């Protein structure tokens, strides 16, 4: 859908530190979120996504102070998710410096939350975060999960994505639980299937490991590509991803 493809670093945060694991398990420390956010901003990130990956599991709110500190260091759109359960949570995050807010588990538990957020703040504020795993029991072959990928919700992922868009989700963050942290590439089949049913921007997440992994995700229908571990580890920079995309004929912001 988009003319220009966005490159988005993801800061998965637990207990005030950026963490990274494989398939959402065995989380390990990857650094200070504010310092990493500033680094990625200086490298040319188009946006930043900041997810408190244990907020729902621990039944606690996102760390608003950390959001404010991050927003003070970067001047690009900041999406924040994790533990968002109400429109009031969204209001507080926006006041703390977020530009967009991601919802996942709470929206699955109460789909009307999507309507409430979209009606009050506008579709452009609401990013539906989809943690998706392969599940042959579902019609599409994909199920949506909750609690940081820990629980299969028993709901068809594509049906839920379509419903959420109809309710007002302005963007879909499609994260493959099966590919997450494996560095073996994005789930192209999943991205194509989501693109086929969604008329809003799609962000590809989960599995990036080499520069050549990004262009296929865009070809499959992603409007933006998101990665975490390859940036945190210094495997390559945001600039190198943009250069690889441009060399493949995909337009990016310089």
Image: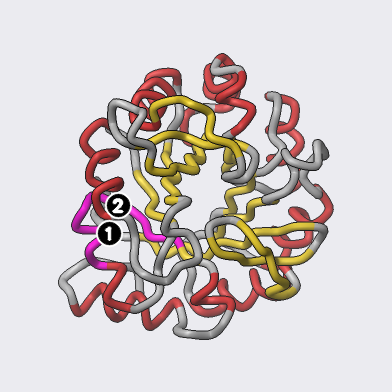
The tag earlier along the polypeptide, 2 or 1, is 1
Residue 36, relative to residue 177: is it above or below?
Answer: below
Task: Give the vertical position of 151 relative to 41 (above or below).
Answer: above
Please name the residue shown 24% across and 49% down the image. 189
Q: Position of residue 213 (x, y in %)?
A: 30, 70
Quarter holding residue 55 = top right
Magenta stretch encompasses residue 202: no
- The residue closer to the viewer here, 157 or 215, is 157
The residue nearer to you, when weighing 86 against 233, is 233
**Which quarter shows the N terminus?**
top left
| Span of residues in magenta | 215-226
Residue 141 position, x and y percent, is 31, 35
Residue 222 is marked as 2
Q: Which quadrant would the C terminus be assigned to in this image?
A: bottom left
**Can residue 125 be seen?**
no
Question: Mark 2–mark 1 contact, CB under 8 Å?
Answer: yes
**Residue shown at the point (25%, 31%) measured from the top left:** 197
Q: Which residue is mark 1?
A: 217
Q: Tell me which residue sits at (47%, 62%) in the image.
A: 8
| 205 relative position to 26: left or right | left
Q: CA distance from mark 2 to mark 1?
A: 6 Å
Residue 40 appears in the figure: yes
Q: Secondary structure at mark 1?
A: helix
Disc 1 residue crowd, few under 14, some 14–19, many 20+, Cα 10 Å: many
Residue at the location (34% across, 42% down)?
A: 201
Note whether 130 is above or below 247 in the view shown.
above
Q: Which one is nearer the viewer's eye here, 169 or 135?
A: 135
The residue lying furthest to the front in this view is: 137
- Give the camera-side residue of 90 and 132: 132
């Amino acid at each position: 859908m988009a003319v220009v493809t966005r490159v988005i670093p993801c800061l998965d945060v637990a207990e005030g530190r950026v963490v990274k694991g494989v398939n959402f398990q065995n989380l390990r420390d990857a650094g200070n979120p504010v310092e990493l956010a500033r680094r990625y901003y200086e490298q040319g990130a188009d946006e930043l996504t900041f997810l408190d990956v244990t907020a729902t599991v621990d039944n606690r709110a996102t760390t608003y102070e950390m959001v404010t500190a991050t927003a003070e260091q970067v001047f690009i759109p900041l999406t924040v998710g994790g533990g968002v359960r109400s429109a009031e949570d969204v209001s507080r995050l926006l006041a703390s410096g977020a530009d967009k807010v991601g919802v996942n588990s709470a929206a699955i538990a109460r789909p009307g939350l999507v309507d409430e957020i979209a009606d009050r703040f506008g579709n452009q504020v609401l990013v539906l975060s989809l943690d998706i795993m392969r599940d042959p029991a579902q019609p599409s072959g994909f199920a949506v999960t909750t609690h940081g990928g820990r629980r299969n919700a028993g709901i068809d992922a594509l049906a839920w994505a379509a419903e959420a868009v109809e309710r007002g989700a302005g963007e879909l963050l499609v994260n493959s639980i099966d590919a997450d942290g494996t560095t073996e590439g994005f789930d192209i089949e999943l991205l194509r299937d989501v693109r086929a049913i969604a008329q809003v921007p799609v962000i590809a997440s989960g599995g990036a490991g080499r520069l050549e992994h990004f262009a296929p995700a865009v070809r499959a229908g992603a409007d933006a590509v998101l990665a975490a571990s390859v940036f945190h580890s210094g495997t390559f920079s945001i600039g190198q991803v943009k250069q690889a995309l441009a060399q493949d004929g995909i337009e990016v912001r310089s």
